[in-house]
Image (cartoon, rainbow, N blue to C red):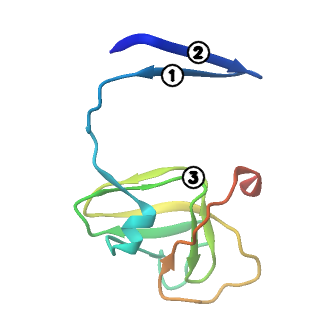
Amino acid sequence: MNFEGLSFSKSKGFGLLQFKTEYADTFDYVSSDNAIKNDFIVVNEVDEQGSVNNLMVLNTSSHFVFFMDGDVLVGAKQNRVLNTSVLLEPQSKTNITVSCIEQGRWRHKSAKFSKPDFIAPAMLRK
C-alpha cells in the first residue's frame, strides 16, 4: 500500500480517509439494475398471497448480484424499497427484506418486479 499523498478530512463528526492503492479487480459482481435488464435475476412475490415485507429473488446467473439499500422495485402486488444492502450468490434463491412505499394497492400490476431510474433516499425510508 502506498501511503504517500494520504489525506484526512473531518467535518461535523464525519471523517474521510483517502488513500491510493494499486488497482486489483478482485471481485466480480453485477448491479441489480443490470441483472434485471439482462434477465440474470427474477424478483417476485414470495408466494401467491405475497408478503409486504419480503420478496423472492432468483439469481439464475453465474454472477454475484448487488442490491443497494434504497433500491426501489416496482410492480407485482405493491412497490417496495430495500432498507439494507444485499449481495446475492450466483445460482441462488433468496428471500429479501423490503418495505412498502405504495399505500392502498395489493393486487398484481405485473407478474414480476422491475427497477425504476431512481432510488429512495434515506429520509423517505425513515
**Residue tagged 3:** 69
Where disc 1 sits, the SS reads: strand
Residue neighbourhood size for the residue with mark 1, other residues' Cα within 10 Å, grouped as few (<14), some (14–19), many (≥20): few
Q: Which residue is mark 1?
A: 18
Give the number of the disc on residue 8: 2
Residue 7 in the image: state x and y as whole percent: 54, 15
Would residue 58 be found to the left or right of residue 80 on screen?
left
Q: Position of residue 3 (x, y in %)?
A: 40, 11
Secondary structure at numbered mark 2: strand
- Residue type indicated by callout 3: Asp
Instruction: Return the x and y of residue 75 as percentages of the image width and height.
Output: 57, 81
Q: At 61% from the left edge and 56% from the top edge, which residue is drawn?
A: 70
Return the disc, 3 or 2, that comes first in the chain's sequence: 2
Which residue is at the front of the view, 26 or 93? 26
Specify the quadrant of the image occupied by residue 17: top right
Kindly indicate the quadrant of the structure image that contains residue 32. bottom left
User: Who comes first in sequence, dot 2 or dot 1?
Assistant: 2
